Image: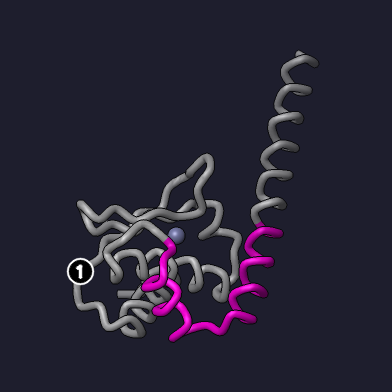
Amino acid sequence: MKISRVEELTNKALNSLNINDNIKIEIKPMKQEIASFSFKTKTLRLNKYVVENFDDELLYYIILHELIHFKTNSLYHGINFYKELRNHFSEEQCNEIELKIIQSVLKMHKIKKYKEQNQKLMESNK
Ligand SMILES: [Zn+2]
């Protein structure tokens, strides 16, 4: 069975964080968020657009980020969160990757806006 890119990156992050729990993955369109984690169902939720358009580096960073929330058992970005994050990425690397994520999100919103405007145009031309 061929495993997906998301599964591969998630497994890599789970190994790296020494997490042995079974984590479910859900990929679906999301309006605002890039990703989220449900503690209740141990589910990693990823924005469909992000999965389809972000490269491995960004996607891995996002997955690792969500799984650190799980590992530190907190939704906050406190001392424990950053302590764990620093085991994987330096501050410089984080800044660089986060900038790329912001740029990709802006691009995502621009495309969405363009599509919506196009849709309106199409409708007004009917
Ligand atoms: Zn977070």
Tally the marks. Answer: 1
Is 103 included in the stretch rendered in magenta?
Answer: yes
Name, please, the residue furthest toward the front: 79
Q: Which residue is mark 1?
A: 22
- Asked whether residue 66 is drawn in magenta, I would say no
Determine the image quadrant of residue 2. Answer: bottom left
Tell me the quadrant of the picture where the N terminus can be found.
bottom left
Residue 44 appearing in the image? yes
Left or right side of 31 for 110: right
Q: Could you tell me what secondary structure mostly forms the magenta stretch?
A: helix
Residue at (67% x, 44% y) in the render: 109
Q: Position of residue 33 (x, y in %)?
A: 50, 48
Q: Position of residue 58 (x, y in %)?
A: 57, 70
- Tell me, what colour scheme is on the image? one colour
Residue 3: image x %, image y %? 36, 73
Residue 4 is at least partly visible in this image: no
The quarter holding residue 15 reads bottom left
Q: Is residue 100 above or below residue 36?
A: below
**In which quadrant of the rendered image does the C terminus lie?**
top right
- Tell which of 122 and 10 is nearer to you: 10
Image-quadrant location for residue 77:
bottom left
Q: Which residues are magenta?
A: 77-104
**Numbered disc 1: secondary structure:** loop
Residue type of the residue flagged with mark 1: Asn
Left or right of 100? Residue 31 is left
Q: In this image, 86 relative to 26: left or right?
A: right
Residue 108 or residue 67, whichever sits in front: 67
Decide: is 100 above or below 106.
Answer: below
